[in-house]
Amino acid sequence: MRKILAILVLVAIAGIAASVLLSKKSVFATPETKACARVNELCASDSSVAQDPRGHPDPRADLEHCVDAMTGAKKVAGQKAVDQSVQCINEATTCGKAMGCVVGGVGVGTVKEVLKGVGDAVTR
């Protein structure tokens, strides 16, 4: 009887853990993933959502593309610029403001990095 009860408890714990890990608003999601979900929430329309192979809406594809872009932005603009954009996006109340957050954080961060490179090249 104790073995059966122990197995049931383990199965319940595994089920709870799986549901938390697979949920959209997982506590384990990166800040970039949460920001991308916020942009999707503010900006996505049914017609703009990516399609799966069967032609059904697949918002996960948009989310994955956004997270990949944010990861790439870290390499180009730096972590600080991405963090600024993420914080701003999380506070945004409209799609336009969220897009402005990306331009203001990542866009300006990229320009700063380019100008640093130009300055380094000129002084050498």
Image (cartoon, helix red, strand yellow):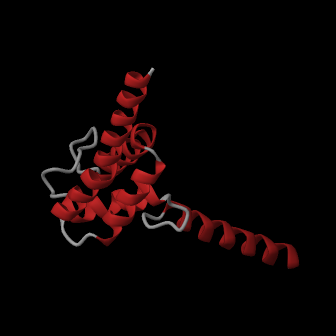
Would residue 69 be found to the left or right of residue 49 on screen? right
**Front-most of residues 84 and 55:** 84
Q: Residue furthest top?
A: 124
Q: Residue furthest front?
A: 123
Would residue 12 be found to the left or right of residue 37 on screen? right
Would residue 3 be found to the left or right of residue 72 on screen? right
Would residue 94 be found to the left or right of residue 8 on screen? left
- Quick check: 119 above or below 98? above
**Front-most of residues 9 and 116:** 116
Q: Residue furthest right?
A: 2
Please state the horizontal and vertical placement of residue 41, each as a whole percent of the image. Answer: 26, 64
Q: Which residue is at a point 47% across and 49% down the rendered structure image?
A: 79
Please state the horizontal and vertical placement of residue 32, each as a whole percent of the image. Answer: 43, 55
Please state the horizontal and vertical placement of residue 23, each as a whole percent of the image. Answer: 47, 65
Residue 116, located in which quarter of the rendered image? top left
- Quick check: 59 above or below 13? above
